[in-house]
Amino acid sequence: MSSFNARRRATLPPLETLTCFESVARLGSFSRAGLEFGLPQPSVSRTIRELEREVGTALLTRTTRAVALTERGAEYLARVEPILNALEEANYSARGTGELRGMLRVGLPSSFAVREIIPRLPKFMAQHPLLRVDLICDDQRQDLVAEAVDVALRFGALPDSTAVARRIAAWPRVLAASPDYLAKAGVLKTPGDLSMHTVISGPSGGGSNWSFRKHHKVASFRVEGRLTVTVNEVAVAGAVAGLGIVSTTLYSCRNELMSGALVRVLSDWDMGRTEVHAVLAAGRAAKPAARAFTEFLVSEFRKSTAR
C-alpha cells in the first residue's frame, strides 16, 4: 500500500472523502465541515488536499476569508452529488425501515420558518432522530443547485422549469393595519381609499399593484410604499408599529390579528390566495429525506386547514 493510501485511510474512507468534499463545497468552510463530521479543521483540510492530489487538479480555492469551488471543482461536484444521492437512496431502500439519515437542507422564507415550520419541526425530527436539518432562511429564492438545497418552500407563481413541485398549502391575501394607525388615518371603505393612506411594501406585498374582487367587480390599484422592506416579518412588524397598511398572507399576520395588534382592512374584498410549493431541483433524484419532509408538510397543513 502506498504511503498516500495509508494516510488517506487513516483519515476518512474514500466515500466519506467525497462526502467531506461536498460538505466543504456547500458550507464554504473547512471548520464548519469539520463540525459536521466531528473532525478538526486540519484533518478536513488534509483530506481535501489528498483528494485533489488523487484527482490531479485543484478543486477549491482557499483564501483567509472563504473557500470556493474552482471551475473544475464545480464540474467534479456536479458528478459526485448524484453518486452520493444514489447511495443514500440505496441505503434507505436497503434498511427498509423508513429511517432517514444524513443532512436535509431546506430553503424557505424566514417568516414562514418562524411561524409555520419551526412549530412543526420537532414532530418530524422526533420521527427521524438520525436526520440533521439545515434551514436556509432567506426571503429571496435560493438557487437549488448552486446552494445544494434539497427542497425549497416557495410562495406564489412558479416560473416555468423542469423542477418538481408539490403544492403544500394556500393562504388568502389580506390587508392589515394597527388600530392606532386606523384611528389616526381613518378606516377604509373601498379599495380606492388606499390613495389617502400609507402602505408598506414588502417581499410578499403583491408587487406595485394590489388587486381586489367583490362579487363581479374587480379593482386594481398601483401603490407605492413609504416604507419598503425586503423581509416579510419586518413588513408585518412595521404595520404593528403603526407605519401603514401591509398586504401579506394570512399566515404571516394571523397571530397579530388574533391578539388585536393588527386588524383586517377591506375584509369584504377578495385579494386572492397565495400558494406555497415544495420545489425539488431538476436533473437529480430527490433525497428520501426531501420526499419525506414534503409528505410530512402536506399532511400537517391538510390537518390544520381541516380544523
Image: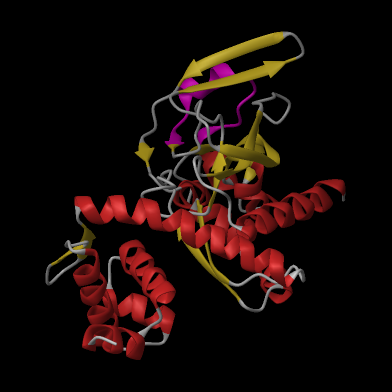
Can residue 119 be seen here? no
Query: Residue 45, relative to residue 93: is it above or below?
Result: below
Q: Residue furthest left?
A: 64
Instruction: Give how far across and how far down residue 58 sits, in percent.
Output: 17, 62
Q: Is residue 34 above or below residue 132?
A: below
* Horizontal arrangement in the rendering, residue 140 relative to residue 126 (left or right): left
Residue at 42% from the left image edge and 75% from the top image edge: 16
Taking the magenta stretch, the answer to whether it contains residue 196 is: yes
301 left or right, relative to 218: right
Which one is nearer the viewer's eye here, 238 or 136? 136
Q: How many marks?
A: 0
Horizontally, residue 127 falls left or right of residue 140, namely: right
Name the image quarter holding residue 126: bottom right
- Specify the quadrant that holds the N terminus: bottom left
Seen from the viewer's position, the closer of residues 60 and 109 is 60
Percent of width and height locating residue 289: 63, 61
Residue depicted at 87% across the width and 47% down the height: 306
Q: Is residue 306 visible?
A: yes
User: Range of the magenta residues?
Assistant: 185-200
Asked if residue 80 is among those painted magenta in the image, a careful observer would answer: no
Q: Quadrant of the rendered structure where residue 141 is?
A: top left
Q: Is residue 100 above or below residue 147?
A: below
Estimate the x, y position of residue 236 in percent, counting from the top left.
Answer: 51, 48
Image point 50% across, 17% down: which residue? 221
**Foreground of the two, 274 or 9:** 9
Which residue is the extreme one toward the top? 216
**Rendering colour mode:** secondary structure
From what the image shows, is residue 168 above or below residue 39? above
In the image, residue 145 lies at what x, y percent? Answer: 41, 47
Q: Residue placed at 27% from the left, 84% from the top?
A: 41
